[in-house]
Structure formats: structure tokens, C-alpha cells
């Protein structure tokens, strides 16, 4: 079923950029916008409705950053010499390399698979005001959710409360995080007593206490039932480890190897801080600060140039998902995207406000998902820092699923409605810039979490099923959907099945791509797969299934992907269909989880697909001969078995002409879904 898309073109006057300093500067105008739209009395931890990233929208500590960014970037050092762009780029490369090294450190030292093999992490360097200066992207949705905890710590401790050698931890979704399993651990970097940078590493952990193992208690009644909350706590203070706090963290986690993961993340933050200090010693504090200002102003200018090339107008779309864990159905996120000159406003008014739902995305998570989608739609050479987001204003309706009231459970928010946030933005902008639109979504509901006692070592195990699988990877302009993971997971690494089989009492039995599951289009979506995992010992499954009604959407006339289906097959052969939720489903040894995953949506008119590519898809068993004719209007002759399959060009031309003529006939009075 397609997501509803509505567009209203509204001619708007392009806003020109005047001057380079003061109220007419790029940064100055963004700051004035923030002052104009931010509700009176709003704080960084509250549920304000409007946010302008890069100016006054994230924290009071960072409030003046954009007003001074352009002016500061024009000078370097005490002498006020112009900032050398080459030096700034060298420093950017160094900061991004430091972030990458922090990420690799976790992979090589962490003790739990979801940290040491999945790449579900993000390392960032923030400047002295908590502004995002550089990053090494793990998964896109982490791109900004690591920024909020640093800015909260700046407010909470105050600059005088931060010391050389501190390492701080935060995972609270209502203090800047995404959901409780995502821990941000960061260290301030000082030079001659002056705070200059923060080195931060965010990782998804295997457990976070709470009412169920695995960090996804989708049926939790509130945030307190979901697990251990930590707004901002010093694990290391002035270089001395706080033994009591480390032990507190350890006792609030089920995973036997958790302490190793925690220490790996602490070590990564400390490594990043050391590397930053080396960089400062090499270039000087004033040059580092000027380079940060220059890079933010550079990204802002590049982003404004990008937006200026998009057609002005207001574009709206609704993205739906099937249900929440309680079975409440047809939950939607509404995005109204206004392009005006070199600025964008994304207004989520119209999103679901039913207060009894069990599906919430914190303001920070909503921001991260919206911006990760936008980042996929702009030039990849624009440095990913806070300046990139300065031309963008987000409007969050309070007490809606994209900005819940304090205390709502949000463990599922990074999945749903998080992916619908990205989907709604992509679908709205697909009417303005379709060639740039590929929804960064994953309609696979949530991880299929398996847990129990491992007979190999008699210890508790938690398997998040982060192993080889194919989900709904959508097509994009110029390319078919591809790979074994969807675009929303970004750089997530799926572990080889053999690694997890050696570690846990499970067997990975199938991951076959499934014929005729991909959305048709000029560029075809990624086929879904038949994912089967078997239990070799008694265990418990916790998950809920999505994409049975609202599947991966197509863009620019492309067809949506096919639905998902999840069944449990018992050792005696009997099956149980999971209609929406599997809460603590017991699995005997010999049981199998059979998950038919739908494919990704297509891009563009399927009748415009190269017939030879359709033939190749049939030979590869992505598309059947019947679907080639039905969906693509391609007539084939010959056999798949002996590779004699050929396109009948004359019959194809005739068939496609007939199909186009049928489209032009009146379709009746029924409204489209």
C-alpha cells in the first residue's frame, strides 16, 4: 500500500544572502530565525515545538555559536590573519580520522558482538560550544543523537564543572539521546586550561536492564520500565576512575561481557581526547577554533547553495506504519516541507497524537532521523557538521509521536516512528527533487531478539539477530536496490552466520532472496529474503512484525515492495503466525523462526525499465517471467533453464503501448489508497 502523498506548489520569493557579518550574515539570519520561532521559556531538555539547528535550537550553551561562526572563521590566531582553507581542510581530515580511530578502537576491544562486529556506533568531535565539528558515521541516525548529551553536560556541569581527564556517560532519551541502549561516552579536551573540543563515541549496547533482555521492552508502560537511565554521570573524574559508578553500571546490565564493552567505549573517548590534544599542540588552539568556525560556515554555505537549487514550494506527505506493540493500527507521521530560497522548514504537525499509543520518538531522535534523510539527498562532499543543518528549521508538535511528553517509553522510537519520520520527509521532497529521494527506512519492525541461558557456558545470552539478512532496500534514481541491508542502516555490518552460530544456540538456515518481492520500477527495489533461524536449545523470542500493510514505498511512480510475514514453526511441524507482536514467545529446541521479508520499493515507471535488465532479473530469479510481463510489460521467449531467454522487442513494444493506454482510461470514483 502506498503512502499518501500530497503536494501544494506555493510560489515563494527567494531569500538572498546579504553580507558576511552581523544580522545579515548567513549565521546571523539563522540565529534571528531561532529567536523568532523558539517558544518563550523553552529549555534544551523540554519539549519545545520548534528547533533551528546550528543557531539557538539545541542548547543555551550553544546559543551564540552561529551568530559568531562566520565572523570568527574569517580570522585565525591572535594576529587576525585570514583562515587558510587548506589548513582548515587539513584539520577537518584530522578530526574525522580521530573519530574513525575511536570507532575502530571499539571494534577491536569490545567484548559483545553488537559492539565489536556490527558497527552500530558513531564517533564525533564537538567544539567548545557543543557544536558538531566532525564525525565518522556508523549508522546515519546516530549522526546527531550524540550531540545532545554533550550539550546537556555543558549545561548541567557548566564549563567550570568539566575537568581535564573527565569521561562522561549519558543514555537518557529525554536529555539528548535516541533510546536507552545507545550510550554516549565522551571526554572534554582542554589546552592550557581552556576547553576546546569534546571526543564522543556512541554505541548501541546489548542490554540496558529494564523489564526484558535486549533493550527493546516494547510493552513497557513508561521510560522507567525500559531500563537504566543516565542523563550525565562522570565515569572518570579528572583522570581517576570512579569505581563505584563503574560497578553501578555493571550491576545494571544482564550481559556478562558488559564491563568490557563499557571499558572499550571509555578507552575510545580517552583515545580521541589524546589525539585531539596532539592536534591542538601541532596547530595551536586559536587555529583549531578558527578552523572549526570556518568549517561550519563552509558547510552552511554549501548546504544553502544546494537548497537554492530546489524548487520553492510546500510539499506534504504522510508515512504510516501498521501498528504499535498493543495493536493500535494505522499510525502516521505527517511532514510538511517548505522550501523557501536557501532554507527549509519541516513541520510535523498532523502527526499522530493518540496518547494511548506505544510508539514514540523523542525530539532528538526525530531530529536525527529527519537530518539523516536530508543528508542522503545532498552532495556527499559537504562536510557533515552542524553548519550543514543551520538552514533547516524543524517544528515538532508537542505530545505527538515525534515529540512525546516526558516519561513516554521510547525504545522502539529509533525504528518506528523513527523510520517514518525519514520516510515522510523523503516522500514529501520526492515531488520536488525525485532524483534525490530514496526513503531511508527499514520496515522490519524491530530486531528479532532471542535470549536465554547458553548451554555452552551456562551464561545469559542475548542475540539481536544482527546477522546476514536482506531487508527492504529501496531503489534510487539510477540504481536498483542492492546489498543485504537497507539504506537506513547505513554502515551497519551484518555478522557472518557462522560467527553467531559458534557463539549462541542458534542455526542460520536460510537467507534466500525471494522472487517477485521487489517493487517494480525503472530501477527495481532489492528483493526480500526468506530468513530462517533455528533454535538448538530452549530460548525466548521477543519481537513484533511490521510491513504487512504499509510496505516499503516506491518513489516517482515506482511500485511498493511486498509485505512481510513471520511464523514460528515448532518441532512437530505446527506453525504459529505472529499477527503483530511476539512477547516472550517460548521456543523449544528444534523450533524455527521463518521470516519472509518484503522487498524495497521501486523508483520510476516500470514500463521505462530497460527490457534487457528485466531479462537479467528473470535469469537471476529476482523477477518471474509472469511478473516481467505483468509489471514491466516485457515479453520474453526462450527458457531460463538453458539461458536461451530473449526479449521479444516487437511484442514488448506492443504490450507496453497497451498498458500505457489502459492507464489513461478513467479509473472510476474510488479514491486511491
Image (cartoon, rainbow, N blue to C red):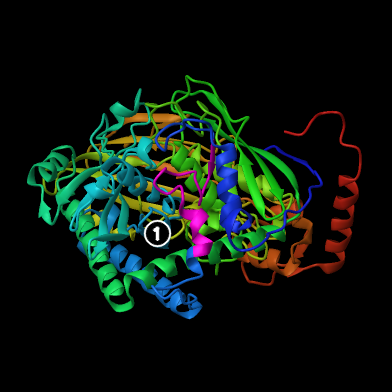
Q: Decide if residue 138 is on the left or right side of residue 349.
A: left
* Residue positioned most to the top: 356
Question: 402 and 473: which one is in front?
Answer: 402
Name the secondary structure under disc 1: loop
State the residue position of label 1: 138
Q: Judge whether 654 appears above or below 414 on screen.
A: below
Question: 128 and 137: which one is in front?
Answer: 128
636 falls in the magenta region:
no
Question: 237 and 510: which one is in front?
Answer: 237
> Which residue range is magenta in the image?
50-71
* Residue positioned most to the left: 243
Q: Quadrant of the N terminus?
A: top right
> Residue 131: image x %, image y %?
42, 55
Q: Residues within 10 Å of mark 1 (few under 14, many from 20)?
A: many
> Residue 344: image x %, image y %?
64, 49
- Residue 500 lies in what quarter of the image? bottom left
Q: Judge whether 52 appears above or below 41 on screen.
A: below
Q: Decide if residue 538 is on the left or right side of residue 441.
A: left
> Residue 464: image x %, image y %?
32, 46
> Residue 321: image x %, image y %?
55, 34
62 falls in the magenta region:
yes
Q: Quadrant of the C terminus?
A: top right
Observer able to see residue 560:
no
Amino acid at each position: 500500500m502506498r503512502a499518501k502523498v500530497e503536494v501544494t506548489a506555493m510560489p515563494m520569493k527567494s531569500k538572498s544572502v546579504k553580507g558576511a557579518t552581523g544580522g545579515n550574515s548567513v549565521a546571523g539570519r539563522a540565529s534571528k530565525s531561532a529567536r523568532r520561532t523558539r517558544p518563550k521559556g523553552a529549555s534544551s531538555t523540554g519539549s519545545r515545538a520548534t528547533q533551528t539547528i546550528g543557531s539557538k535550537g539545541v542548547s543555551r550553551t550553544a546559543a551564540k555559536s552561529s551568530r559568531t561562526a562566520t565572523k570568527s572563521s574569517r580570522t585565525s590566531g591572535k594576529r587576525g590573519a585570514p583562515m587558510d582553507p587548506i589548513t582548515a581542510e587539513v584539520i577537518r581530515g584530522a578530526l574525522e580520522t580521530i573519530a574513525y580511530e575511536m570507532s575502530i578502537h571499539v571494534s577491536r576491544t569490545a567484548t559483545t558482538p553488537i559492539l565489536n562486529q556490527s558497527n552500530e556506533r558513531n564517533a564525533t568531535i564537538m567544539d567548545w560550544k557543543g557544536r558538531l565539528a566532525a564525525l565518522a558515521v556508523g549508522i546515519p541516525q546516530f549522526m546527531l543523537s550524540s550531540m545532545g548529551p554533550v550539550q546537556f553536560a555543558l549545561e548541567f556541569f557548566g564549563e567550570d564543572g568539566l575537568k581535564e581527564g573527565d569521561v562522561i556517560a549519558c543514555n537518557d532519551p529525554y536529555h539528548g539521546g535516541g533510546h536507552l541502549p545507545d550510550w554516549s561516552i565522551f571526554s572534554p579536551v582542554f589546552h592550557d586550561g581552556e576547553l576546546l573540543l569534546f571526543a564522543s563515541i556512541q554505541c548501541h549496547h546489548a542490554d540496558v536492564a529494564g523489564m526484558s533482555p535486549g533493550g527493546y521492552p516494547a510493552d513497557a508502560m513508561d521510560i522507567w520500565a525500559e531500563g537504566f537511565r543516565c542523563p550525565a554521570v562522570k565515569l572518570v573524574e579528572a583522570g581517576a576512575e570512579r569505581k563505584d559508578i563503574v560497578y553501578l553500571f555493571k550491576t545494571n546490565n544482564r550481559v556478562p561481557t558488559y564491563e568490557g564493552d563499557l571499558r572499550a567505549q571509555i578507552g575510545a573517548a580517552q583515545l580521541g581526547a589524546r589525539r585531539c590534544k596532539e592536534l591542538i599542540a601541532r596547530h595551536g588552539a586559536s587555529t583549531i577554533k578558527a578552523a572549526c568556525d570556518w568549517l561550519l560556515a563552509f558547510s552552511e554555505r554549501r548546504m544553502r547553495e544546494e537548497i537554492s537549487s530546489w524548487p520553492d514550494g510546500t510539499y506534504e506527505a504522510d508515512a504510516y506504519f501498521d501498528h504499535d506493540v498493543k495493536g493500535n493500527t494505522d499510525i502516521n507521521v505527517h511532514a510538511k516541507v517548505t522550501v523557501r530560497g536557501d532554507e527549509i522548514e519541516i513541520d510535523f504537525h498532523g502527526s499522530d497524537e493518540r496518547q494511548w499509543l506505544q510508539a514514540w520518538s523523542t525530539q532528538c531522535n526525530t531530529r536525527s532521523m529527519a537530518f539523516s534523510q536530508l543528508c542522503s539527498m545532498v552532495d556527499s562532499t559537504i562536510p557533515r557538521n552542524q553548519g550543514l543543518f543551520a538552514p533547516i528549521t524543524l517544528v515538532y508538535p508537542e505530545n505527538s509521536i515525534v515529540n512525546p511528553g516526558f516519561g513516554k517509553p521510547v525504545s522502539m522510537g529509533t525504528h518506528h516512528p523513527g523510520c517514518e519520520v525519514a520516510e515522510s520527509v523523503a516522500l514529501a521532497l520526492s515531488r520536488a527533487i525525485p532524483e534525490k529521494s530514496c526513503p531511508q527506512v527499514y520496515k522490519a519492525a524491530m530486531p528479532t531478539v532471542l535470549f536465554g541461558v547458553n548451554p555452552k557456558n551456562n551464561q545469559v545470552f542475548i542475540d539481536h539477530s544482527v546477522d546476514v539478512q536482506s531487508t527492504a532496500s529501496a531503489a534510487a534514481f539510477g540504481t536498483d536496490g542492492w546489498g543485504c541491508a537497507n539504506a537506513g542502516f547505513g554502515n551497519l555490518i551484518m555478522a557472518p552466520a557462522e560467527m553467531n552460530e559458534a557463539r549462541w544456540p542458534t542455526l542460520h538456515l536460510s537467507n534466500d532472496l525471494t522472487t517477485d518481492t521487489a517493487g517494480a520500477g525503472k530501477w527495481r527495489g532489492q528483493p526480500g529474503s526468506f530468513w530462517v533461524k533455528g533454535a538448538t536449545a530452549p530460548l525466548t523470542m521477543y519481537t513484533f512484525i511490521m510491513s504487512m500493510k504499509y510496505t516499503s514505498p516506491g518513489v516517482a511512480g515506482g511500485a511498493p515492495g511486498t509485505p512481510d510475514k513471520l511464523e514460528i514453526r515448532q518441532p512437530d511441524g505446527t506453525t504459529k503466525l505472529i499477527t503483530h507482536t511476539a512477547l516472550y514467545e517460548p521456543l523449544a529446541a528444534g523450533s524455527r523462526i521463518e521470516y519472509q521479508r518484503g522487498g524495497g520499493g521501486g523508483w520510476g515507471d516500470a514500463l521505462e525499465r530497460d527490457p534487457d535488465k528485466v531479462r537479467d532479473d528473470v535469469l537471476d530469479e529476482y523477477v518471474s517471467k509472469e511478473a516481467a510481463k505483468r509489471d514491466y510489460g516485457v515479453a520474453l521467449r526462450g527458457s531460463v533453464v538453458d539461458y536461451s531467454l530473449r526479449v521479444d522487442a516487437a511484442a514488448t513494444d506492443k504490450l507496453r503501448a497497451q498498458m500505457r493506454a489502459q492507464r489513461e482510461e478513467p479509473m472510476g470514483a474510488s479514491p486511491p489508497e
